[in-house]
Image (cartoon, rainbow, N blue to C red):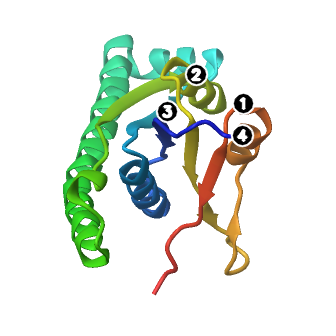
Amino acid sequence: MLKPIQSILFATDLTPNCQQALDFTIVLATRFKATIYMLHVIERLPNNMDEKLKDLLGKHQWEDLVSSHQANARRSLLGKQSTNSRVREAVNNFCKEVGIADDACDFHSSEIIISDGEIVEEILAKAVDNECDLIVLGGHKNLFSDSSAFGSTTKAVLKRAKIPVTIVPPAALS
């Protein structure tokens, strides 16, 4: 028997493909009054590449570039969080339309986590660190057909996760 969903890790690469997964996460968190942890992992470069770039750009310029990327990721996630207000409002309107009580139509909170490292390792570690009951990932459109595809990150998370993982396909392109 599955335990109740009290916290959800939503891992995003900040692409539009993840919007459906974010919307799904919000609706699920609303349904279960769960906490959402929004995670973006900045993949570390191999040490030899990192050192070459430091040598090429200079240590301070390289550190500024890395800081800038982290700040952009945080701004993007904060932007998604403000969109959450609109989604939360839409969910509340939906709940009213179908007759669900207001107190049953809210999620507790969301926390933004920006991490650097190996993507799969970080997703799994953050799920454990935050005692998450579910991991939600966004699928990607397959380049060669109209179907959704699983990338290597998704496959690795599915293979190694000790908790349920949900993959949400991206919205159909108009």
Report helix, strand or loop for mark 1. Answer: loop
The quadrant in which the C terminus is found is: bottom left
Alpha carbon distance from label 4 to label 1: 14 Å
Q: Nearer the viewer, mark 4 or mark 2?
A: 4
As drawn, the label of residue 41 is 3
Q: Which residue is mark 4?
A: 1
Determine crowd level at label 2: few under 14, some 14-19, many 20+ residues with C-alpha closer than 10 A.
some
Q: Earlier in the sequence, mark 4 or mark 2?
A: 4
The quadrant in which the N terminus is found is: top right
Between 118 and 162, the one lying in front of the other is 162
Is residue 45 visible in the rendered image? The answer is no
Q: Which residue is mark 1?
A: 162
Report helix, strand or loop for mark 3. Answer: strand
Q: Which residue is mark 2?
A: 128
Look at label 1 and name its amino acid: Lys
Q: Residue at x 40, y 58 (%)?
A: 27
Is residue 135 visible in the rendered image? The answer is yes
Labels 3 and 2 touching (C-beta < 8 A): no
146 sits left or right of 92 in the view: right
117 sits left or right of 161 in the view: left
Q: Earlier in the sequence, mark 4 or mark 3?
A: 4
